[in-house]
Image (tube, helix red, strand yellow):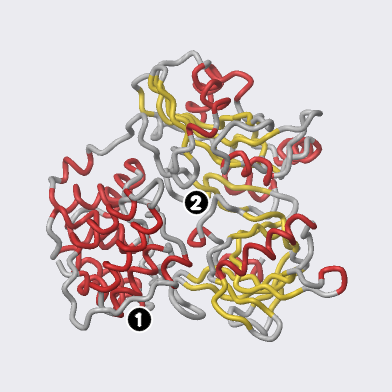
Amino acid sequence: MLLAEVVATVSVVGATRSRLAKSDALAGLLRELQPDEIPIAIGLLTANPRQGRVGVGWRGVFSLDAEHANTPTLTLSDVDEAFDALAAHGGPGSAAERSATLRDLAERATPQEWDFLSRVILGELRTGALEGVLLEAIARAADRPADAVRRAAMLSGDLGETAVVALTASAQALEAIGLVVGRPVLPMLAGTASSVAAAIAEAGESSVEYKLDGARIQVHRDGADVHVFTRSLADITHRVPEIVEAARALPVDRAILDGETLSLDEDGGPRPFQDTMARFGSETAAAIALRPWFFDILHLDGRDLIDEPLSVRRALLSAIAGESVMPGIVTDDPERAEEFSREALAAGHEGVMVKGVGAPYAAGRRGKSWLKVKPVLTYDLVVLAVEWGSGRRTGQLSNLHLGARDPEGEFGEPGGFVMVGKTFKGLTDATLRWQTEHFPTIETHRSAYAVHVRPITVVEIAIDGVQRSSRYPGGVALRFARVKGYRSDKRPDEADTIQSLRALLRG
């Protein structure tokens, strides 16, 4: 298939707000693909090529001087081969080789194709073709139940592989996709509740657990072989030797564990989130050690557990993980749950998670079975621009313009971001220095007072609520917003939505 056909479909998808129309357009494209083209197309449509990151950044793309083709000739296989070559370049002289490969690809692409490929390479493809819509399109194209496709994608952790099976194999083959120790699973996600009492009322009898300000981990053990994955399914095993050793010490042979990790200070209290993320970004073990806390188990010695109720999973987890189990209680009493929440806060943690004990593990889903309760509302937003500071902040980038994700384009471009407020509160001197260095590297243009940037930097913002506002297109503005920290572990397509903020108005 020609790349131009994918580009044309993406244009159709981006031009409509109708979820059904998006799904129809994508399904039509998928039906025309050859089997070996399916994972390539899925990678392009999700801006997640099967090669992963290909070693090309913003400067490499936009500093390229190339004369584009007049007519489309590039096939999906051509693009895949070029991405293979880009990913393979390494060592001395690799920058020049990578630049030459990139220039060759750019010269073979039409201007429209190169615009598309540039956004894929940089992970900025915003068309409204979110994975949920693409899952529906795969099911429609393959004439398979949407739930079966969704479950296979969650358990394989690979949408491209799932699409290949759904479109080319039998229904039984799709249903046979299950847990594999060593292959990461999309993590179960949590909703938000306004209070512990509200969460208990929603979930019923629940496991009420500490909510750590740490980083999500998924640990797979197969004998002495251990792999540790992040919430985005990146393999960080070589960066966290202490978690590997903790997993090897468990009295099991094969297991998949879900948990969180963070570093502790000398008094046993939690260090700031940035300390934990600094370890995730380091290629070598550092002086700051990480400790794992496990709160779920998905597989144990040949037994898949995701369809078992949480009460069963927690009992099995407690039997093998001992002091590494996330502290928690089981109760349906709002007062007891609230008391435990106060204990979590006193220990320096963010709040609590309230999880219905009868619920299975819904990989990759955000529902009402898991609810997070924190005394201050926090949202993951995206930085759209940064204003220059004044006074003691003169010469530093300070005031952040914050955007919430708009997946369906209700208030603008589908898959884009809607501005919801500004803040300069909560910024440390170190963060100000980092901002001033970082944001010019992703600058798109400047106005008289601000540096406008590509919407790729996720920041966790604490707020006291929202208020109605005619100033911003989404109709809401943040109240008393302050920065908690940057979330280098999250992609912009994982930011919170404008709809979730607008829901606070009704609250």
Q: Residue at x 22, y 37 (%)?
A: 176
| Rendered image quadrant of residue 19 | bottom left
Is residue 470 visible to us here? no
Where does residue 188 sit, x and y in percent of width and height? Answer: 47, 44
| Rendered image quadrant of residue 64 | bottom left
Is residue 165 shown left or right of residue 53?
left
Q: Residue at x 45, y 71 (%)?
A: 415
Mark 1, residue position: 15
Tag 2 near tag 1, CB within 8 Å = no
Q: Tell me which numbered mark, 2 or 1, is placed earlier along the sequence.
A: 1
Where does residue 329 sit, x and y in percent of width and height? Answer: 66, 30
Look at label 2 and name its amino acid: Gly
The foreground one among 371 and 99 is 99
Look at label 1 and name its amino acid: Ala
Q: Residue at x 49, y 51 (%)?
A: 367
Instruction: Please identify the residue farthest to the front as the structure is shown.
Output: 93
Where does residue 277 sit, x and y in percent of width and height? Answer: 62, 44
Instruction: Please identify the residue farthest to the right as the structure is shown.
Output: 391
Report the disc number at residue 367: 2
Q: Is residue 449 above or below residue 456?
A: below
Report the disc number at residue 291: none
Is residue 81 shown left or right of residue 131?
left
The foreground one among 198 and 194 is 194
Q: Secondary structure at mark 1?
A: helix
The foreground one among 436 and 46 is 436
